[in-house]
Image: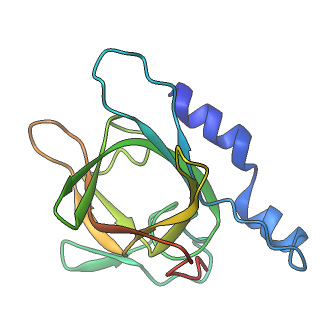
Amino acid sequence: MTLTLLAVLLLGACEKENKLTATHKQTRNRVITLPDNGKTGNTTLLLAICIGHDGNGCNGCVWEDGKLYHINCMGEGNYCATATAVQLQQAGSTINATTTDTFDLTSENFFLMPDRSLEYVDEKENHLYLNIPGQMVYRDNTTLQFTFTGLYFSQTAAYNND
């Protein structure tokens, strides 16, 4: 919960900010490295993202039980400021990110993640992007965490974040 409050303070209101800064588009999608508490030895990253869209005029964006539903703060758009702490796992060129918090993104058992490119500054001060392909992820039955797959780093943003 503390991480969510921190992210909300850092991000502000995404939709409102995007309208005000149309001429100077400063991204609110970023990766923040959290201080290592020394317990796990793993680096925890905070993914601060603007996602989702207003439900007005949305005929449904999530298919569940044979029907389309609108669920706030999921899917395309930049309406909601949200954040989640993750740890990255890399096997060869494959990078996955598993949430370390349980309900910061949603209390649902699924999460519709849109394509996002998040600004990232690594430990050597290199400016990169962590690219997350759009995907529907489901909560693990045992750990209750989400795992995003197919992430990759690049020098330029792969997604436009609209």
Q: Tell me the residue at 25%/57% (across/down).
A: 96
Residue 45 lies left or right of residue 42; in this view the side is right
Residue 45 lies left or right of residue 66; in this view the side is right
Residue furthest left in the image: 142
Please provide percent x and percent y for residue 80. Answer: 61, 58
In the rendered image, the vertical position of residue 23 relative to residue 83, given as above or below: below
In the rendered image, the vertical position of residue 12 relative to residue 85, given as above or below: below
Q: Tell me the residue at 88%/70% (across/down).
A: 21
Q: Tell me the residue at 56%/56% (across/down).
A: 120
Residue 55 lies left or right of residue 138; in this view the side is right
In the rendered image, the vertical position of residue 34 relative to residue 48, given as above or below: above
Residue furthest front in the image: 124
Between 112 and 98, the one nearer to me in the picture:
98
Determine the image quadrant of residue 28.
Answer: bottom right
Between 102 and 38, the one nearer to me in the picture:
38
- Quadrant of the image containing the C terminus: bottom right
Which color scheme did the rendering employ for the protein? Answer: rainbow
Determine the image quadrant of residue 4.
Answer: top right
Between 113 and 52, the one nearer to me in the picture:
113
Please tell me how many numbered marks the rendered image carries: 0
Please provide percent x and percent y for residue 51. Answer: 55, 65
Q: Tell me the residue at 20%/50% (across/down).
A: 139
Please provide percent x and percent y for residue 23. Answer: 90, 79
Please provide percent x and percent y for residue 128. Answer: 55, 64
Between 71 and 122, the one nearer to me in the picture:
122
